[in-house]
Amino acid sequence: MRGWIDIGRLDDIPRRGARRVVRPCGSPAIAVFRTADDALYALTDRCPHRGGPLSEGIVQGHAVACPLHGWVIALDSGKAEAPDEGCVTTVGVKRIGDRILLSASMLEVDGRPRWKAR
Ligand code: FES
C-alpha cells in the first residue's frame, strides 16, 4: 500500500473552502479544507451532530461551522467546540509544492486506490 495519494492541486480548493473526495462502498466522503493562510486539513465529511456535510460549512480560522445547525469543528482535531460534544475522524493530508496528498489508508480498498475528487 502506498503512503500518500495525490488528489489535486492546491488551487483546486479556494481559500476558506473545501473539496470532497468520494469513497466507495458507502464510506463517508472526505472533506479537504484550505484555510485563509493555506493550511490544509482533511476530515470525514459528516458532522458528529447529525451528519451534516462539513464540506459545505463556513471555514472560520482553523475550524469549520456545520451548515445545518452551526456546530463548530476544529479542523486539526476534529473535535466539536464546547459546549457541544463529539468528534469526526481526521485524515492525514500534506502538501508538496502545489500538490495535495491524502493518506492512502483512507482511500484504498484491497490495496487499490478507490476515490474521486469533486
Ligand atoms: S448536523 Fe452539524 S450541527 Fe447539526
Image: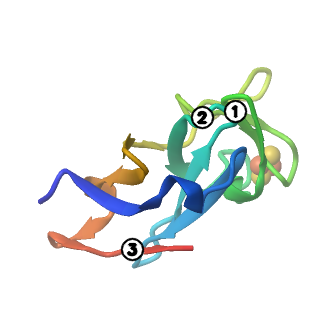
What is the x, y in percent for residue 41?
Answer: 52, 40
Q: Pick the quarter of the image with the C terminus.
A: bottom right
First along the sequence among labels 1 and 2: 1
Instruction: Give me the disc on residue 63.
Output: 1
Q: Out of 96 and 108, give the one closest to the viewer.
A: 96
Q: Out of 6 and 51, give the one closest to the viewer.
A: 6
At 66% from the left and 29% from the top, the residue drawn is 62
Q: Secondary structure at mark 1?
A: strand
Give yes or no for contact between labels 1 and 2 (Cβ–Cβ under 8 Å): yes
Amino acid type shown at disc 3: Trp
Q: Quadrant of residue 105?
A: bottom left
In the picture, measured across the screen, residue 115 lies left or right of residue 75, that is left
Q: Quick one: label 2, few (<14), some, or many (20+) residues within 10 Å?
A: many
Residue projecting furthest to the top: 82
In the picture, measured across the screen, residue 111 lies left or right of residue 98, that is left
What is the x, y in percent for residue 14?
Answer: 68, 54
Distance, label 1 to label 2, CA atoms, is 5 Å
Q: Which residue is mark 2?
A: 75
Residue 51 seen in the current view: no
At 76% from the left and 21% from the top, the residue drawn is 82
Q: Which residue is mark 3?
A: 115
Q: Secondary structure at mark 3?
A: loop
Amino acid type shown at disc 2: Leu
Q: Quick one: label 3, few (<14), some, or many (20+) residues within 10 Å?
A: some
At 70% from the left and 36% from the top, the residue drawn is 36
